Image: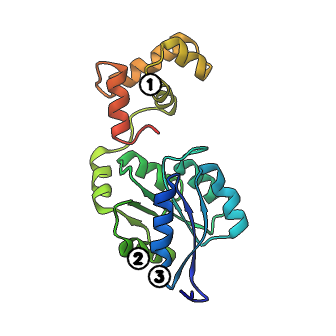
Amino acid sequence: MTKREDAIRILLADDQALVRGALATLLGLEDDLEVIAQVGRGDEVLPAAAEHRPDIALLDVEMPGIDGLTAAARLRAAHPGVRIVIVTTFGRAGYLSRALSAGVTGYVVKDTPAAELADVVRRVMRGETVIDAALATDALTAGPSPLTPREAEVLAAARDGGTISDVARGLHLSEGTTRNHLSSAMQKLEARTRADAARIAEDRGWLL
């Protein structure tokens, strides 16, 4: 298909090749949209943006290298003119808060119909902020994370079931400090165990 000269230039970042390819194909059917670069890792976003100069970046959340929200923040800092849309399976309220803090102006889930996603791209390009309505409602209901950044970091490190010693060593903390952060997180989340605390925080999008 012949693209318009003013077609919106899109960078796609998703670690699933099939999903990435499908999005590129569907968006490519629009004569005013052009996918000019695709990457499968979060740490490839910045180099690709520098090389290809997209108008909009569509980023997944969970990717190897760095996650999509971290990539979004770095992209926003390095290339403030690039608008960013998160397209993800993970419609968690806490992720939305982090995305907005990172300068993201669009947040939709992957089951968004192709025509609707194309419209999101156009609206964001016009300067609108477009957030999935159900997710926005969930975010208002859940509220902000009660965890401090360090509590969230320790809880994330502990969710795979490692010992206190393992977690402490991995984060370069003392075992006593690690226990204190985990205890505080459990109290705030009204969880009986650190596994429960991690599950609650992850379900609400407060961990990545």
Query: Is 19 drawn above or below residue 97 in the view shown?
Result: below
Q: Which residue lies at the image location 28% right of the left edge and 19% below the top edge?
A: 192
Question: Is 107 situated left or right of 83 in this image?
Answer: left
What residue would you read off at disc 3?
Answer: 30
What residue would you read off at disc 1?
Answer: 160
Which amino acid, by three-letter code, is at mark 1? Answer: Asp
Q: Quadrant of residue 114?
A: bottom left
| Disc assigned to residue 119 | 2
Q: Which residue lies at the image location 36% right of the left edge and 47% below the top edge?
A: 92
- Along the line of sight, which residue is nearer the eye, 89 or 20? 20
**SS at mark 3?**
loop
Q: Which tag, 3 or 1, sits closer to the chain's start?
A: 3
* Mark 1 neighbour class, 10 Å CA radius: few under 14, some 14 to 19, many 20 or more: few
Query: Is 152 drawn above or below residue 54 in the view shown?
Result: above
Check the image and name the residue furthest to the front.
18
| Disc assigned to residue 198 | none
Q: CA distance from mark 1 to mark 2?
A: 39 Å
Query: Is 49 drawn above or below residue 190 in the view shown?
Result: below
**SS at mark 2?**
helix
Q: Which tag, 3 or 2, sits closer to the chain's start?
A: 3
Q: In the rendering, at what x and y percent does residue 170 appear?
A: 59, 21
In front: label 3 or label 2: 3
* Mark 2 neighbour class, 10 Å CA radius: few under 14, some 14 to 19, many 20 or more: few
Q: CA distance from mark 3 to mark 2?
A: 10 Å
Contact between marks 1 and 2 (CB within 8 A): the answer is no
Q: Which residue lies at the image location 50% right of the left edge and 64% below the top edge?
A: 21
Question: Is 177 situated left or right of 172 in this image?
Answer: left
Check the image and name the residue furthest to the right.
51
Q: In the rendering, at what x and y percent does residue 198 appear?
A: 38, 29
Q: Which tag, 1 or 2, sits closer to the chain's start?
A: 2
